[in-house]
Amino acid sequence: MKRLAWPSWMPIDPYIVLLLATVGLAALLPARDTAADAVSWASTAAIAFLFFLYGARLSTREALDGLRHWRLHVTVLACTFVIFPLLGTAARGLVPVLLDQPLYQGLLFLTLVPSTIQSSIAFTSIARGNVPAAICAGSFSSLVGIVVTPLLAATLLGSGGGGFSAHSLTEIVLQLLVPFLAGQVLRRWLGGFIIRHKKVLGLVDRCSILLVVYTAFSEGVVRGIWHQVSPLRLGGLLVVEAVLLAVMLLLTWYGAKALGFGREDRIAIQFAGSKKSLASGLPMAGVLFGAHASLAVLPLMLFHQMQLMVCAVIAKRRARDPEVREETDAPAARPPAAAASRDR
């Protein structure tokens, strides 16, 4: 019996369809009362387990090797935690023309969260970029974001962000950093198994995000928050996010070129420096925004879906760059020593 596959002509990634279906499920059958408590606990545990797997997968040698490429990582961190927040702050001028205050708070929050790990690696690999650099850049961004994102939220969002406190930072550290460090400690025994079964990490990644999305949107439906968002405001938010993504994609690509990075490094910088993580952002929003987290994560969810679709197209086009075709078509033209040097 033939296995069913997602049609290649479909422009939408199947995971985006699952995300939209999860939102629809939350709208029709939101978790309430005891069920809401159970789902909330399960989503917290799933995210903690996800970061444990990240820690167990990233080898200490990869992290140390990545540190040597410090210019690339500083560039990605600057894009993620400096340029993105500056653009988010500048978007304040769009209130109330295109955005209302709650949606703007969510938009500003999305500019503060760390970069992605899984999709940055996947797109960098498809585009024939520097995959080890993408692994380290995404991991460093997530670790730095555990501390930097709440601090930026306290500075830029203030009381509108639900409040920042030592308690909220402690919750974020316990949910994200501690499991990551535990994974690093146990990597000696678990790392080989996880690497051999790397599909498990991708499955846990996606399922945990779906669970957190369901939890957040269920809470929004129960509290009636979604009645506050009109179709016109949603349209305005999509336009603003499309412009934000386009600016960051152009800036990371041409800015990296101006800084003297080669093609492979520019690819890693573009995909790691222009994207935002649902896996990190959703639990942080739950801590920082409390009861209003469901509305605050809407801009992040929409941006995440947009970046997946756009970056998938870009990655495939990068893989067809002339220099990539030349390397593929004439592998024997390089002297063996040069080939060995490149493969290291």
Image (tube, rainbow, N blue to C red):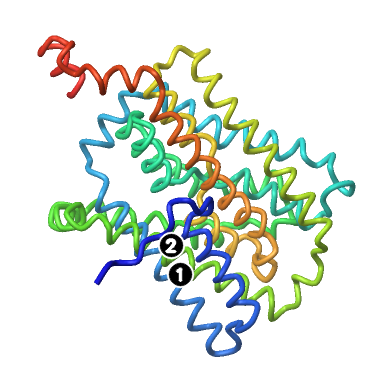
Q: Residue furthest left?
A: 336
Residue 197 is marked as none
**Disc number placed over residue 44 in the picture, else none:** 1
Q: How crowded is mark 2: few (under 14 residues within 10 Å), some or many (20 or more)?
A: many
Q: Give amino acid for label 2.
A: Gln
Q: Which residue is drawn at 48% across and 83% down?
A: 38
Q: Mark 2 points at which residue?
A: 175
Quarter of the image holding residue 295? bottom right
Query: Is the Cβ of the residue at disc 2 closer than 8 Å to that at disc 1?
Result: yes
Of the 4 image quadrants, the one containing the N terminus is: bottom left
The alpha-carbon separation of the residues under discs 2 and 1 comes to 7 Å
Residue 337 lies in what quarter of the image? top left
Picture coordinates of residue 93, whole percent (x, y): 84, 39
Q: Residue at x 20, y 52 (%)?
A: 195
In x, y percent, where is residue 172?
Answer: 49, 58
Which amino acid type is marked by label 1?
Thr
Q: Where is residue 45 in the image (x, y as percent from the top left)?
A: 40, 71
Q: Nearer the viewer, residue 183 or 219?
A: 219
Using the image, determine if residue 130 lies above or below residue 93. Answer: above
